[in-house]
């Protein structure tokens, strides 16, 4: 049976979705944007700051479910501007230093609240 995961250490969902769903050994994390969970507001800043906030939100959700960044097996990244890819990638590499997950990165015309980046993730941990 699937289990809804929720933590106050990540942004509250802004629509009819869960932060994450645990289904068996898998954890499916909804797309996260750079919202500060303490204020529920979009953070100010460039792609570096926004990427860091998004990855911290994902990390908080993982931890709430008993997972870690090392358990992430797949990530999808949505960037508003692919010219920001190198700056994004430097921050991303700080979080996934060894055996990084699979990843797809796409440029999109817009994202919720006009942010620069949104990331969703799938994690796996044998039970």
Image (cartoon, helix red, strand yellow):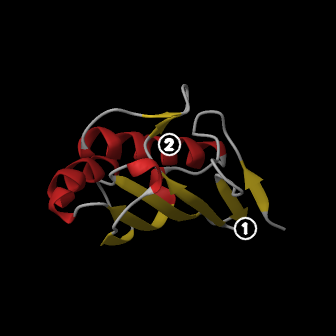
Numbered circles on residues, count:
2
Which sits in the foreground, 21 or 72?
Answer: 21
User: Could you tell me how far apart the alpha carbons at marks 2 and 1 are, in whole angstroms?
Assistant: 20 Å
In the displayed structure, would residue 67 be above or below residue 11? below
Say left or right for 72 vs 1. left
- State the residue at coordinates (32%, 72%): 106
Measuring from the top left, give residue 67's x and y in whole percent: 58, 51
Location of the N terminus (image quadrant): bottom right
Measuring from the top left, give residue 65's x and y in whole percent: 66, 49
Task: Residue under label 1, please give it.
Answer: 23
In the displayed structure, would residue 9 be above or below residue 74? above
Task: Residue under label 2, please give it.
Answer: 57
Instruction: Check disc 1: other Cα within 10 Å, few if <14, some if 14-19, many if 20+.
Output: few
In the displayed structure, would residue 53 be above or below residue 73? above
One can see residue 7 in this view: yes
Whether pointer 2 and pointer 1 mark residues with C-beta atoms closer than 8 Å, the reply is no
């Amino acid at each position: 049976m699937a289990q809804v995961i929720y933590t106050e250490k990540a942004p509250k969902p802004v629509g009819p979705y869960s932060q994450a769903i645990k289904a068996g050994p898998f954890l499916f994390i909804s797309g996260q944007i750079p919202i500060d969970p303490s204020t529920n507001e979009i953070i100010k800043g460039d792609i570096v700051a926004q990427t860091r906030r998004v990855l911290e939100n994902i990390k908080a959700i993982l931890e709430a479910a008993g997972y870690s960044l090392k358990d992430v097996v797949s990530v999808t990244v949505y960037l508003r501007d692919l010219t920001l890819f190198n700056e994004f990638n430097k921050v991303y590499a700080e979080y996934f230093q060894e055996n990084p997950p699979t990843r797809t990165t796409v440029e999109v015309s817009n994202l919720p609240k006009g942010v620069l980046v949104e990331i969703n993730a799938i994690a796996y941990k044998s039970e």
